[in-house]
Amino acid sequence: MRPAILIHGPTASGKTELSIEIARKLNGEIVNADSMQVYRELKVISARPDEEEMADVPHHLFGHVPASERFSTGQWLEQVRPVIEDIQKRGKTAVVVGGTGLYLLALTEGLSEIPPVPEDVRHEVMDILKADGVRGLKVRLQVVDPDAARRIEDNDRQRLMRAYEVWLATGKSLTSFQSNRSNPVLNPDEWLGVALTPPRAKLYARIDKRFEGMLMEGAMEEARELVRLNVDPDLPAMKAHGMPWLSAFIRGEINSTMAAENAKRDTRRYAKRQFTWIGRQFPFWPRIPGADLKTRMRVVSALYKEVDR
């Protein structure tokens, strides 16, 4: 079976373009590893590949989950295993691409067996966050799970909430669960991983330009539909890049300029956290700092020849 190719990188770094080119050149099929691109209603806001981009190459696990549902890493891992196995059995290359580092970490290192967190616990932690802020939540986490508190950055609201939710729901620290992982889907000799690390100034400019393009392509209409459907704001789909600010504009709480600027700012901050994640969680993945597609292809092709022997 041909080794899988895993492509990670911050948002707007060109992962989609590279994955399609790799799939074309190496007889591959693309598998989504982005936690927002799984949601059916987030076609534009999640920067999901469009129909033209998906026309030449089979794509899997894109846009198949309703925004009204909470989709977990565990569910993704259950779904991705048979997809990759089927691609490989047919003699093709699985090209797994996405900005959700936890998906790729679970794929290659296994997943901690953490019990589901009840909705009332999620709401309790959200109330704590609203009352005490991110700093106050981290102080609480330092008491019950100091190891997790050290690992998680001060402004990483989502991971801080997750760690505290696990403790409230189970009475055990997230760290204790993470020490006991399931078997990975891909063994070390069955995959090649690369991380795209373009210059930050250029990436941030691209993020701003892309969001402006999203607004022209229907991002506001997608946000209006989710607000109309009264999707719970605590669900993951409602926290996609820009969604909280677009929703606030639709409700009349802020003007359009503030919504756009705050959305761009938050996306740039998220990209910065993704760079940090790559440095900490994937220290041995080859970096591709150049943004030119031909250069990226040459690097991936050379690396792939070494593992596909």
Image (cartoon, helix red, strand yellow):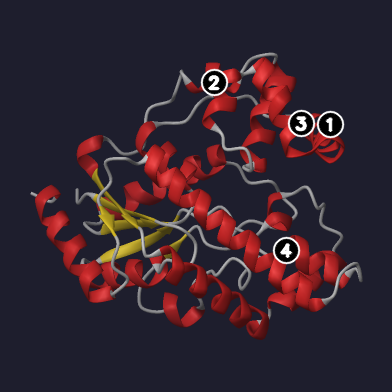
The residue that mark 2 highlights is: 147
Q: Separation of disc 2 and disc 4 at Cα? A: 31 Å
Residue at 18%, 62% in the rendered image: 299
The residue that mark 4 highlights is: 243
Q: Amino acid at mark 1?
A: Glu
| Above or below, comparing residue 265 to residue 132 in the picture | below
| Above or below, comparing residue 139 to residue 243 in the picture | above
Label 4 neighbour load within 10 Å: few <14, some 14-19, many 20+: many
| Above or below, comparing residue 59 to residue 168 in the picture | below
- Asked which secondary structure carries label 1, the reply is helix
Residue at 43%, 63% in the rendered image: 200
Outermost residue, bottom side: 216
Q: Amino acid at mark 2?
A: Asp
Going from N to C along the chain, the mark reached first, 1 or 4, is 1
Q: Nearer the viewer, mark 2 or mark 4?
A: 2
Q: Separation of disc 4 and disc 3 at Cα? A: 25 Å
- Asked which secondary structure carries label 2, the reply is helix
User: Picture quarter containing residue 38?
Assistant: bottom right
Residue in front for this viewpoint, 171 or 280: 280
Q: Separation of disc 2 and disc 1 at Cα? A: 22 Å
Going from N to C along the chain, the mark reached first, 2 or 1, is 1
- Asked which secondary structure carries label 4, the reply is helix
Going from N to C along the chain, the mark reached first, 3 or 1, is 1
| Above or below, comparing residue 55 to residue 194 in the picture | below
Does residue 63 appear left or right of residue 56 in this picture?
right
Q: Amino acid at mark 3?
A: Gly
